[in-house]
Amino acid sequence: MGCQTEIVSAIIDKQADYILAVKANQSQLLEDIEDEFKFGKTIETTTGEDLDHERIETRKCSIISNFQFIPIENNWNKLSTIIKTESIREFKNSEKNTETATRYCISSLKAKPVDFQKAIRSHWAIENKLHWTLDVAFSEDASRKRTANASQNFSILNKIALNLLKNEKSSKIGVKSRRMKAGWDNHYLIKVLNLMKVYCVCPGC
């Protein structure tokens, strides 16, 4: 849902800029972007590497600002740059030797490939850490909620609960254990819920 024309317009109306991932649900836009990178002549690129004890990751970020296949009068407000990120992960001690991934993004910004690469990597570092915690502590990936807005609503509630549990510092245990303790101990649950008075910024709270 992140890459929608209404969201893009709302961001621009607030005088902000966007970098949004493009997925298969935006099939025409995705096809146009793939054509741009397949046939485009003005492509800027940067490459970087990460080394650790278990893997080597090579990342390539390419951008195009001069479009040939995306109409000038498109639905994406202030669209200035399209981005392609490619990663190759080589694992030293694993049966799965190589893992590759290609992602596309759109942006209202005009910047260098290295700047887009830093911004996208920073976002995914936060997103992956958050997603991992929600899955471990709340089993979010196993959720079967699909009706209407149930999935989105429960995701918001899970994030609120996660923030409260993270900010409850009296118990030196993990978030999953804190959640379990809150379910077993009403006194601890009240202590966690009282943090809403400290961290809630909703009008009237």
Image (cartoon, helix red, strand yellow):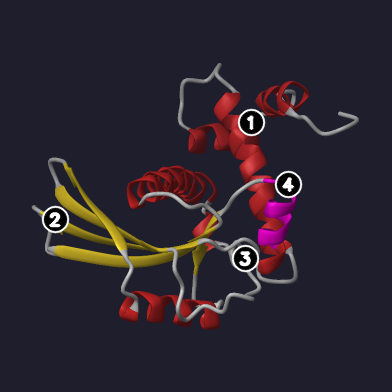
Closer-to-camera residue (116/162): 116
Task: Identify the image quadrant of residue 149.
Answer: bottom right
Query: Residue at 59% across / 23% down in the picture?
Result: 168
- First of labels 1, 3 by sequence position: 3
Disc 3 from disc 2: Cα separation: 32 Å
Q: Are marks 2 and 1 in contact (CB under 8 Å)?
A: no
Q: Earlier in the sequence, mark 2 or mark 1?
A: 2
Front-most of residues 72 and 49? 72
What label sits on residue 14 in the rendered view?
4
Q: Residue at the location (64% across, 76% down)?
A: 73
Could you give the CA–CA distance between mark 2 and mark 4, rounded to whole angstroms? 43 Å
Q: Which quadrant of the view contains residue 85?
A: bottom left
Image quadrant for the C terminus? top right
Q: Residues within 10 Å of mark 3 (few under 14, many from 20)?
A: few
The foreground one among 162 and 27 is: 27
- Magenta region's main secondary structure? helix
Label 1 crowd bin: few (<14), some (14–19), many (20+), radius 10 Å: many
Circle 4 packing at 10 Å, graded few (<14), some (14-19), many (20+), is few
Q: Which mark is first along the chain, 4 or 2?
A: 4
Q: Say which residue label 1 marks.
A: 164
Q: Nearer the viewer, mark 2 or mark 4?
A: 4
Q: Quote the CA–CA distance across marks 4 and 3.
A: 19 Å
Q: Amino acid at mark 2?
A: Phe
